[in-house]
Amino acid sequence: MKVEVFGTGCDKCHLLEKHVEEAIKEVGVNAEVVKVDDIAEIMKRGIIFTPGLAIDGETRVSGRVPSVKEIKELLAGAT
């Protein structure tokens, strides 16, 4: 599983990354976490507001920081 965190380094982007790491640990899935901070790539993926989250290439969240619980649900639905 590939999990991408989109953001340019703002506090919310860092918080999303923290939540993702915690959710992956709690669910126990094997996932590669990739930080995407290139504005052109973020826009190319259709994310207008950061932070953003994609799982296996599918954008799941944009413009907000989901809770650890919500990320766990997204991860469980992707397996």
Image (spheres, rainbow, N blue to C red):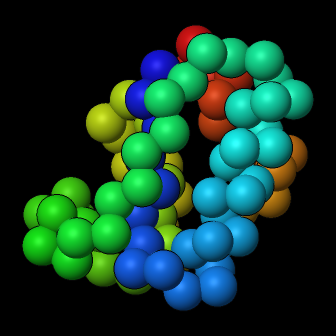
Residue at 68% from the left image edge and 47% from the top image edge: 20
Tell me the quarter of the image containing the C terminus.
Answer: top right
Q: Residue at x 57, y 74 (%)?
A: 13
Residue 74, compared with residue 62, is above or below; it is above
Tell me: residue 38, above or below residue 36: below
Q: Nearer the viewer, residue 36 or 56?
A: 36
Residue at image coords 63%, 71%: 14
Q: Relative to residue 75, is residue 8 drawn left or right?
A: left
Q: Where, by quadrant of the figure, is residue 11 drawn?
A: bottom right
Q: Position of residue 17 (x, y in %)?
A: 63, 58
| Residue 25 position within the rendered picture, expressed as x and y whole percent measured from the top left | 80, 30
Can see residue 65? no
- In the displayed structure image, the side of residue 37 where residue 40 appears, left or right: left
Mark yes or no: residue 34 visible: yes
**Residue 34 is drawn in which quadrant?**
top left
**Residue 14 higher or lower than 74, as above or below:** below
Q: Give the x, y percent position of residue 23.
A: 78, 39
Front-most of residues 69 and 12: 12
Give left or right: position of 10 versus 14.
left
